[in-house]
Image: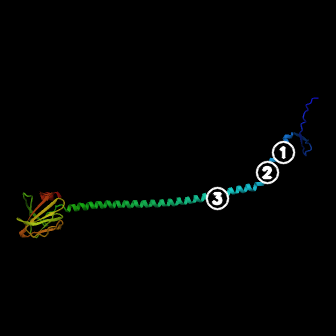
Amino acid sequence: MGRNRHKRKNSHVVIVTSDAAESGMKQFRIRPWMLHVIIVALCIIIGALIGYFAYEKDIWAAELDQTMKQNETIGVLEQEKAELEGQIAALDEEISGLNEEISRLNENIRILSETVSQQVETEGELSGQLEKRFLPTRLPVSERASMDNVTEELMCIFTAAAGSMVVATADGTVTVVSEDPEYGHNVWIDHGNGYTTIYRNQGEVKVKQGETVTQGTTLFIITDESSKLGYQMMQDGAYVNPMDMLEISG
């Protein structure tokens, strides 16, 4: 025999039987290392189950605590969401109010614009009327009168009936009241727009130098002795034909 000896291989036999009459007995041969592996695996599983059941309460408590914290976070977020929704609703209401205020202001602006336009138009009309009042376009006598002629000095000679009045042909200021060698008296009126009118008559003067007069103000009263009126007009210092002005005005 050689010196080398075969090591004896140990094995475990697992016998499986059944209560059935016809069933036989089965044997399973398991190596020791396989049995060790199975035992270790079983120990691990059993240890895990024991650890699980031992710490199950703590695990569930931790899960419950985590769930409660999540619920609290969700509650806080929902509350913040509700507050934000309330703020948004308040902002929408404020914006709606601002839009209404803007609409009201726009309407007021429109009304004011129309009012200003009407005022400008009215002021334009009044300005036109006022400007017209300073234009010497009226006849210088209150009643009917006949015009005899226009002299070389561009003086219109009128003959009026007694009781008539010599009147200012436009608004202005009396600048001169003086004696006239031919007509007795003369009155000069500056109308403030470049026009000056001159009235010559033998009647009594009814205005004073520096007095403000309006269109139609009485300057003289015509009598039988003062039926003649000499009427002149100057524009920017130069004599013009008064009848041209009357014709322009219609």
- Report helix, strand or loop for mark 2: helix
Q: Amino acid at mark 2?
A: Leu
Q: Is residue 32 above or below residue 74?
A: above
Task: Please report whichever mark, 3 or 2, sits nearer to the chain's N-terminal start.
Answer: 2
Determine crowd level at label 3: few under 14, some 14-19, many 20+ residues with C-alpha closer than 10 A: few
Q: Which residue is mark 1?
A: 39
Q: Which residue is mark 2?
A: 49
Is there CB contact under 8 Å for labels 1 and 2?
Answer: no
The mark closer to the camera, 1 or 3, is 1
Task: Please report whichever mark, 1 or 3, sits nearer to the chain's N-terminal start.
Answer: 1
Q: Which residue is mark 3?
A: 72
Res. 189 in view: yes
Residue 235 lies in quadrant: bottom left
Q: Amino acid at mark 3?
A: Glu
Report the front residue among 192 and 155.
192
Marks 3/2: CA–CA distance: 33 Å
Q: Which mark is residue 156?
A: none
**Where does residue 182 sit, x and y in percent of width and height?**
5, 64
In the image as oriented, which residue stretches furthest toward the front?
Answer: 3
Residue 63 lies in quadrant: bottom right
Report the front residue among 157 and 30.
30
Q: Amino acid at mark 1?
A: Ile
- Report helix, strand or loop for mark 1: helix
Residue pictured at 76% horizontal, 54% vertical: 55
Report the front residue among 88 and 215.
88
Is there CB contact under 8 Å for labels 3 and 2?
Answer: no
Residue pictured at 32% horizontal, 60% vertical: 116
**Where does residue 174 sit, x and y in percent of width and height?**
15, 66
Is there CB contact under 8 Å for labels 1 and 3?
Answer: no
Determine crowd level at label 1: few under 14, some 14-19, many 20+ residues with C-alpha closer than 10 A: few
